[in-house]
Amino acid sequence: MQTKDETISFLRAKRQQLMDDIGSLEKDLEHLNATIRMLEREPVSIQNITLEIPSSESEFPLAKLKGLKQMEALMIIAKHYGGRVKAQDVKKLLIRSGVMKETKNSTNITHNLILRTGKFERIAPGEYRLKTEPEMALGLTLHHVQ
């Protein structure tokens, strides 16, 4: 036969177990309600969704870069886009043209390539502007962002 304290302890444990079960059931109920709400919404047509492809990737003639070194290809890309480049766009163009292979380190390689030339200044995170000839001769940087 159980003592009064043992019985109380047993009942409290049973109550806690039932409360945990109720909590789990409430979560399941929330998930079911969310699924029902999602399914009741109007379906979205794939035809209405348009993907925006950055102009730097869609308009650039990749054949110009074939057989070039990375630095030469970078300069052609920069001149094509009026001297402003985004490092991620440059990386994608270099990979698509075969000038650079896609690796885990491709982004770092691209940023280092841009910095190594000494012909670009950073105007925003990941965005660079080709310095003009007088700026390069004097070593000037007009807009340096850190």
Image (cartoon, grey):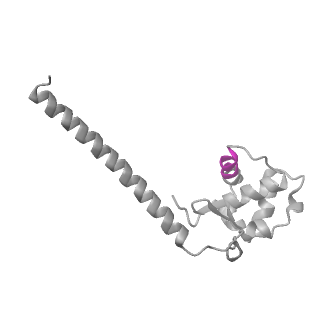
Quarter where residue 135 is shown: bottom right
Q: Quadrant of the N terminus?
A: top left
Q: Is residue 34 left or right of residue 135?
A: left
| Residue 32 painted magenta | no
In the rendered image, residue 107 lying in the magenta stretch gets the answer yes
Q: Main secondary structure of the magenta part?
A: helix
x, y (%) of residue 120? Answer: 67, 60
Residue at 50% x, 62% y is 35
Q: Is the residue 92 above or below the residue 135 in the image?
A: above
Q: Position of residue 103 (x, y in %)?
A: 72, 44
Q: Say if residue 140 shows up in the picture.
A: no
Q: Quadrant of residue 75?
A: bottom right
Residue at x 78% of width, y 55% of height: 94
Q: How many marks?
A: 0
**Relative side of 131 to 25, left or right:** right
Residue at the spot 90% in from the left edge and 52% down from the top edge: 67
Above/below status of 92 relative to 59? above
Between residue 126 and residue 19, name the one nearer to us: 19
Q: Residue at x 41, y 59 (%)?
A: 30
In the displayed structure, would residue 15 be above or below residue 7? below
Q: Position of residue 42 (x, y in %)?
A: 58, 76
User: At which x and y percent is residue 93?
Assistant: 77, 59
Magenta-highlighted residues: 105-112
